Image (cartoon, rainbow, N blue to C red):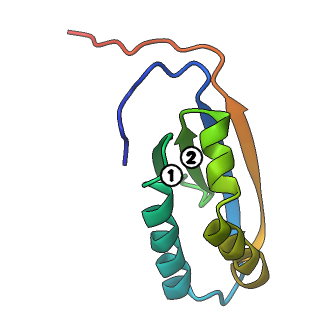
C-alpha cells in the first residue's frame, strides 16, 4: 500500500498503537478498517499505511501523508470522525497516536 517515494521532507507520519477491548468484534473492526482504507486511499496526499506486529504482541500501524494538509483532510473527514467515535466506544481499550514530521531523509539507496 505504498504510492511511491517522492521527496519525503515535510512528510507526516502517524504511528498508532491501539489496543482492542476484550470481546471486541474482530469481524466488524476489520470491516470498518477496510471501509476507512477505501476512503483514505483516495484522498490527495495519502501515501501508505502498513501494520507491524512485534514478537511481544505489540502492534503498530504507520500512516504516511505527503503533508500536514493531507493528514488534516483525513483527520476531519466526516466518516473518519464518526468511525473513530465508534472505535473509542466499542473497540479500543487504550492506545496512542504519535504525529511526526520528517525533518531529514537518507536515501533511497541500493547496494550491489
Depth check, mark 1 against mark 2: the one in front is 2
Q: Quadrant of residue 78?
A: bottom right
Give the SS element for disc 2: strand
Q: Earlier in the sequence, mark 1 or mark 2?
A: 1
Q: Would residue 29 be found to the left or right of residue 101 on screen?
A: left
Q: Which mark is residue 76?
A: none
Which residue: 38% across, 16% down? Answer: 108
Q: Whole-percent x and y of residue 70?
A: 60, 42
The alpha-carbon separation of the residues under discs 1 and 2 comes to 8 Å
Label pair 1/2, CB-CB below 8 angstroms:
yes
Q: Which residue is mark 2?
A: 62
Which residue: 37% across, 49% down? Answer: 1
Which residue: 39% across, 27% down? Answer: 5
Q: Is residue 83 visible?
A: yes
Q: Which mark is residue 52?
A: 1
Give the SS element for disc 1: strand
Near mark 1 (Cα within 10 A), the count class, few <14, some 14-19 or many ≥20, is few
Amino acid at each position: 500500500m505504498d504510492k511511491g517515494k517522492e521527496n519525503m521532507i515535510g512528510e507526516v507520519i502517524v504511528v498508532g498503537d491501539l489496543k482492542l477491548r476484550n470481546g471486541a468484534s474482530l469481524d466488524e473492526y476489520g470491516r470498518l478498517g477496510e471501509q476507512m482504507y477505501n476512503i483514505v486511499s483516495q484522498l490527495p496526499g495519502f501515501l501508505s499505511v502498513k501494520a507491524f506486529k512485534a514478537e511481544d504482541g505489540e502492534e503498530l500501524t504507520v500512516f504516511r501523508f505527503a503533508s500536514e494538509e493531507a493528514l488534516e483532510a483525513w483527520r476531519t473527514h466526516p466518516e473518519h470522525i464518526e468511525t473513530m467515535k465508534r472505535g473509542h466506544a466499542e473497540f479500543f481499550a487504550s492506545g496512542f497516536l504519535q504525529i511526526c514530521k520528517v525533518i531529514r531523509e537518507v536515501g533511497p539507496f541500493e547496494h550491489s
